[in-house]
């Protein structure tokens, strides 16, 4: 990026961030997610650090939030409420530490880490021990007076507790164990109470459970908390069970560390965030990872961990850059959405010959995974999104797994963006590309296209099909390139010597592959059908086909049942549940092709044993299950098989039709979706009882 391009990019980022921040902070409207906006701000901050000459007073990085609403009295502060810069990785965290070490060489750092509650920041001023003024963050220097609304929050004390009397007379608060840092008893017992003025800062938030009845009108608890505090009628805030968590004590009581400030807050009667003192970055990362695992089970929402230099003298010494202290960072969890740029769009050929446009992205971390590609599905989707090569886009992970482009940000265009057109020739074999009548996809017209053949091989040996261990894409490619296999049936003709001659194969690994091939010859009918790679026939359809033809009577062997499927007409196939006209036509057409008939003959001669399909039970008949997270007792594939065999149906995404969400360890966003839709959520133990 040239200096001129950087300047132009910075200006465009400033404009779009200010636009979305105004919608959210002034008009209480949200059009993109917090995570996506954070990603845009992070890019702007990084560019400004690289080109500091372009930092301007009107940059979003130089202020904290929007202007106060006209409906509230303004509150000016002597000490501004500053913001925090975000980091999203251990590498960025270490870069920050290196930066601090350059500013303060030979200093030993101690860090204080605490949960970053996703709420609404406020300041509380106490005069002579009584709550006097409560205000919003506002612009940092000037906030909004929302005292009456804050007074309705039970966790905000209207009168400070006297720490001196609590220490001298602990019987006044039975069952409370005071944890007082070494030497702190002397200092706290000698200050005058109540103090003439005391300022506390913290977060107003709402528990997830209390948010349930408001979720139809608000996108998340944070928005609801903000909207409640900024109401002119205190009765509204009073009705919403808001809470307060203190995270900073501005008044100086002689505390030397930020952690001591937390203890003072607790002793004064505040609910203060639990934290931990860390000696180095490794300990911070361990804490961050531990909190991430507990995140879903916490009663409130958090979006990361706040990391600050614990020693107050050092913290002050580092000072402020822009509107953020140098000595503090928000170590955010990987966002479910992030902004990045489309570097290119390429057409990828799949096992059915379908060309799928794939966006090549500037790598960005989303949901804990570095994403560099995202599917665009088909050309109709490209037109719907309006995406061009060079665009800035918001990318997310659909169903926790598949990277997906959610929104294009045309406001950031430079004029150099390019329109993508689907190729007229196959990018692999050069054959003509056609668009079947009535379909949105484009297909390579060459059934012998090498890309199609290779993708079919990959599918054939995959876990849900023949599950041949050791035959990944790289090995399959070598087998094809060496002329050892021409169709899938040739896999079962491979010998130990064939594998051993391949590069990087030792005797033991070659032997393991051959053993896995032999073991895979025994396969269920449904998995065999799925392995063939018939267009529109996924695992669920393959299972339905196997069940239907097994129940028709006649031959008991798996091959005999399969023969009935092979000879079925389109009309016969349309009678099967979950098989419509398009799927029936696809299945019938597949069996008419001579190349596929030859493949079936080859598989039969290779010694494949198709096992008879066991009849399904009825205990889960018609019930739709979605699994999220990991289970200790069985794999996801095993769980899906159990569900099918009991008459249920496993699904990959949560919808209104879902009957049960099985929540395993480290459940993802599907859990939130299930709560939102009112889907019944069960744990692994309850699920195991259902499938016994």
Image: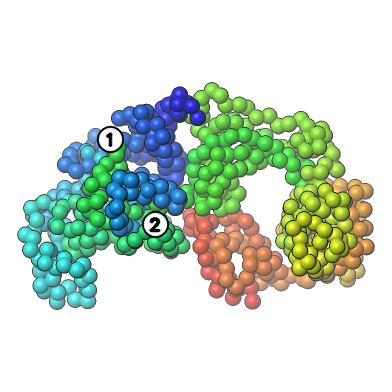
Mark 2 or 1, nearer chain start: 1
Q: Is residue 433 above or below residue 478?
A: above
Q: How is the image coloured?
A: rainbow
Quick check: can you spot residue 577?
no
Residue denoted by label 2: 281
**Circle 2: element type:** helix
Name the residue rendered at 14%, 57% in the picture: 253
Q: Position of residue 349 (x, y in %)?
A: 74, 42
Per the rendering, the mark at residue 265 is none
Q: Callout 1: 10 Å neighbours few (<14), some, many (20+)?
A: some
With 219 as the anchor, is 504 left or right in this view?
Answer: right
Q: Is residue 320 above or below residue 467?
A: above
Q: Position of residue 630 (x, y in %)?
A: 57, 65
Q: Is residue 286 above or below residue 196?
A: below
Q: Nearer the viewer, residue 69 or 7?
A: 7
Name the residue rendered at 19%, 51% in the picture: 250
Q: Quadrant of the C terminus?
A: bottom right
Q: Nearer the viewer, residue 173 or 58?
A: 58
**Circle 1: element type:** loop
Residue denoted by label 1: 67
With 30 as the anchor, is 400 left or right in this view?
Answer: right
With 303 as the anchor, is 531 left or right in this view?
Answer: right
Q: CA distance from mark 2 to mark 1?
A: 36 Å
Q: Position of residue 280 (x, y in %)?
A: 37, 59
């Amino acid at each position: 990026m040239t200096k001129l391009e950087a300047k132009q990019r910075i200006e465009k980022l400033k404009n779009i961030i200010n636009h979305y921040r105004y919608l959210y902070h002034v008009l209480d409207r949200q059009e993109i997610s917090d995570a996506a906006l954070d990603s845009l701000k992070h890019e702007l901050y990084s560019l400004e650090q690289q080109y500091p000459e372009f930092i301007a007073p009107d940059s979003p990085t130089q202020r904290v939030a929007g202007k106060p609403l006209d409906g509230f009295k303004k509150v000016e502060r002597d000490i501004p409420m500053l913001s925090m810069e975000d980091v999203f990785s251990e590498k960025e965290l270490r870069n920050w530490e290196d930066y601090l070490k350059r500013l303060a060489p030979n200093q030993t750092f101690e860090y204080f880490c605490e949960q970053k509650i996703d709420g609404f920041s406020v300041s509380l001023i106490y005069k002579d021990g009584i709550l006097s003024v409560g205000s919003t963050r506002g612009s940092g220097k000037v906030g909004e007076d929302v005292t009456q609304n804050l007074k309705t929050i039970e966790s905000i004390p209207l009168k400070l507790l006297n720490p001196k009397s609590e220490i001298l007379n602990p019987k006044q608060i039975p069952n409370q164990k005071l944890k007082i840092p070494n030497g702190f008893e002397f200092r706290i017992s000698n200050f005058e109470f109540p103090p003439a003025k005391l300022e506390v800062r913290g977060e107003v938030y709402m528990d997830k459970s209390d948010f349930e009845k408001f979720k139809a009108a608000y996108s998340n608890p944070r928005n609801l908390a903000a909207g409640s505090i900024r109401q002119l009628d205190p009765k509204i805030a009073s009705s919403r069970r808001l809470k307060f968590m203190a995270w900073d004590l501005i008044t100086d009581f002689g505390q030397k560390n930020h952690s001591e400030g937390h203890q003072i807050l607790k002793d004064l009667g505040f609910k203060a965030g639990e934290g931990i003192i860390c000696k180095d970055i490794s300990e911070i990362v361990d804490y961050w990872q531990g909190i991430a695992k507990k995140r879903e089970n916490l009663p409130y929402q958090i979006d990361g961990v706040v990391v600050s230099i614990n020693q107050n003298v050092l913290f002050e010494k580092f000072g402020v850059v822009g509107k953020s202290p140098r000595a503090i960072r928000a170590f955010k969890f990987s966002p479910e959405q992030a902004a990045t740029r489309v570097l290119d769009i390429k057409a990828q050929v799949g096992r059915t010959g379908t060309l799928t446009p794939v966006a090549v992205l500037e790598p960005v971390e989303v949901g804990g995974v570095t994403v560099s590609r995202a599917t665009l599905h088909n050309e109709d989707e490209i037109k719907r999104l309006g995406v061009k090569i060079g665009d800035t886009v918001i990318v997310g992970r659909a169903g926790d797994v598949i990277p997906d482009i959610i929104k294009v940000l045309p406001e950031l265009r430079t004029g150099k963006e390019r329109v993508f057109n689907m190729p007229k020739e196959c990018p692999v074999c050069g054959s003509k590309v056609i668009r079947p009548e009535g379909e949105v996809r484009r297909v390579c017209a060459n059934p012998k296209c090498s890309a199609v053949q290779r993708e079919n091989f990959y599918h054939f040996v995959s876990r849900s099909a023949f599950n041949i261990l050791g035959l990944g894409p790289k090995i399959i490619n070598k087998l094809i390139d060496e002329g050892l296999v021409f169709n899938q049936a040739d896999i079962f003709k491979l010998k130990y010597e064939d594998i051993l001659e391949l590069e990087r194969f030792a005797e033991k690994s070659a032997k393991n592959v051959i053993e896995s091939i032999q073991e895979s010859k025994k396969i269920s009918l449904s998995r065999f059908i799925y392995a063939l790679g018939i267009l529109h026939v996924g695992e669920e359809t393959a299972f339905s086909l196997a069940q239907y033809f097994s129940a028709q009577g006649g031959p008991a062997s798996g091959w005999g049942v399969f023969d009935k499927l092979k000879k079925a007409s389109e009309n016969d196939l349309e009678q099967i549940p979950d098989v419509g006209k398009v799927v029936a036509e696809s299945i019938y057409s597949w069996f008419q092709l001579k190349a596929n008939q030859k493949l079936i003959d080859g598989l039969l001669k290779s010694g494949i044993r198709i096992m008879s399909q066991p009849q399904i039970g009825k205990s889960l008949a018609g019930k739709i299950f979605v699994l999220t997270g990991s289970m200790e007792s069985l794999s996801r594939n095993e769980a899906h098989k159990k569900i099918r065999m009991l008459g249920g149906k496993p699904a990959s995404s949560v919808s209104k039709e879902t009957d049960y969400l099985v929540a395993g360890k480290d459940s993802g966003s599907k859990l939130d979706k299930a709560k939102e839709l009112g889907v019944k959520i069960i744990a692994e133990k309850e699920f195991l009882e259902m499938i016994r």
